[in-house]
Amino acid sequence: MMQLDEWQDDGPGWHRADAIVRRVQAPAFPDREVLVEDHGAVADGATDCSAAIAGAIDAVRRAGGGRVVLGAGTYLTGPIRLFSNIDLHVAAGATVRFIPEPERYLPPVLTRWQGVEMMGYAPLINAHDAENVAVTGAGILDGGADTEHWWPWCGMEEFGWRPGIPAQGDDWEHLVEQVRQGVPPKQRIMAPASNLRPNFIEFYRCEQVWVQGVRIVGSPMWEIHPVLCTGVLVEDVQIDSHGPNNDGVDPESCTDVVIRNCRFDVGDDAVAIKAGREDDAERVDEPCRNVVIEDCAMTMKYGAFTIGSELTSGVRDVYVRNCTIGGPNLWYGLYIKTNAARGGYVENVYVDNVAVTELRREFLSCNFLRGEGLEGPRTPTVRHVRISNVRVGRARRALHLAGYAHSPIADVHICDSTFESMAEPDSIENVVGLMLTNTHSA
């Protein structure tokens, strides 16, 4: 690695992360508690509790808000819709097991699928245009997805797809074509008779969102997906779900997000910060900004802290600190994904005090030539990345940075960091303002 003598940090600094954390607080709820058992739920793992859970939520809503409690036992249910001033509390010893029958997740609702708005299968837990809404507790949320249910739709044999099973590829192309034709989102009907899997927990246009304590397993798609939200707190969550596209937390086009004290063992990116995709993102035009990730542990599979690849509307002011990552099946540390098809900007990314055991690829990867590469009408911009106090035990490389000649990656500073056992030299192409201070690699 090239060493420069002077470390300069002229960006907004870590005080902005502290300010975000102060702003994003858990919402308060009225002192009211309703047990789903009082509305007919039977936690025997065999009785359909959908109506009982909905009845308890409705009772709390009509009373002005409060906590809906699922006590010890196993509850079978279809999708759960939440509303303002409601905390869905899954107590210790409780398991909420979602019935993996697609017809249960109809009628279709407004959602985003890989950054594109559409009318699709309802997320397993969802809220729209709500304030003060939460999913809390020490229980388990089981999405019921496996190689027999939901996952085969991805089209990969390792997840149960076989010839004759409809896969999502054709449906995705149909959705993209509707966007090109200017079809409004509420007319992009992608359920039923399509195979675009629902996300697990999705908050759409909500304020003061809180997910706390629960363990998530068996997700059909992305696990926690706030979209166009303000004030999102995800804390003390454990995610163990190795299915296709099983990202952990995907804040998309959100403002003020804090993700802390979480453990991720997932089938895709642990945290993936997003801002919509291509033409549809340009229509909505909402960036994702002010995201803090702290005191988390990531063990698999692709990126620990990912920005993109749906980031056409831009991502800025991201802060990662005091995290541990790494394992034989984790690929990247900080992974910034864009190209000429996606475009967008990434700026003001801070990483501090991260310990890494092992990565299959790079700690920092940002390669404009990936995927569609040079093809596409957009010019991505990545600038102002600050990395400090990072220790990586083993990886393919410390850095893989590849910008364009007409849009180089700019202003990347790394200091006080050690990359102990790198299999290959760094790969650097079209980067300006790369500064490394007190940083060592072997």
Image: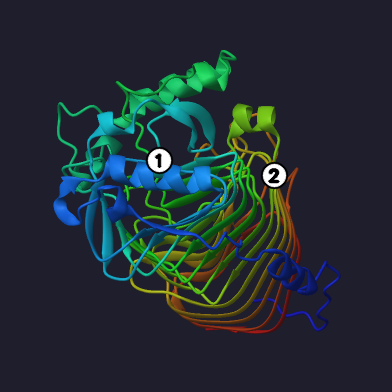
Residue 70 place in picture, x, y as percent: 33, 59
Residue 431 place in picture, x, y as percent: 71, 58
Disc 2 marks a residue whose amino acid type is Pro
Q: Which residue is mark 1?
A: 123
In depth, the one of 293 and 370 nearer the eye is 293
Location of the N terminus by quadrant is bottom right
Crowding at dot 1, Cα within 10 Å, few <14 / some 14-19 / many 20+, comes out as many
Is residue 243 visible in the rendered image? The answer is no
Q: Earlier in the sequence, mark 1 or mark 2?
A: 1
x 19%, y 38%: residue: 161
Tag 1 secondary structure: loop
Q: CA distance from mark 1 to mark 2?
A: 22 Å
In depth, the one of 215 and 80 nearer the eye is 80
In depth, the one of 362 and 300 nearer the eye is 300
Disc 1 marks a residue whose amino acid type is Pro
x 57%, y 60%: residue: 29
Is residue 25 visible in the rendered image? The answer is yes
Q: Nearer the viewer, mark 1 or mark 2?
A: 1
Q: Which residue is mark 2?
A: 287
x 20%, y 53%: residue: 42
Residue 19 place in picture, x, y as percent: 76, 69
Determine whether, in the image, residue 303 is placed left or right of residue 291: left
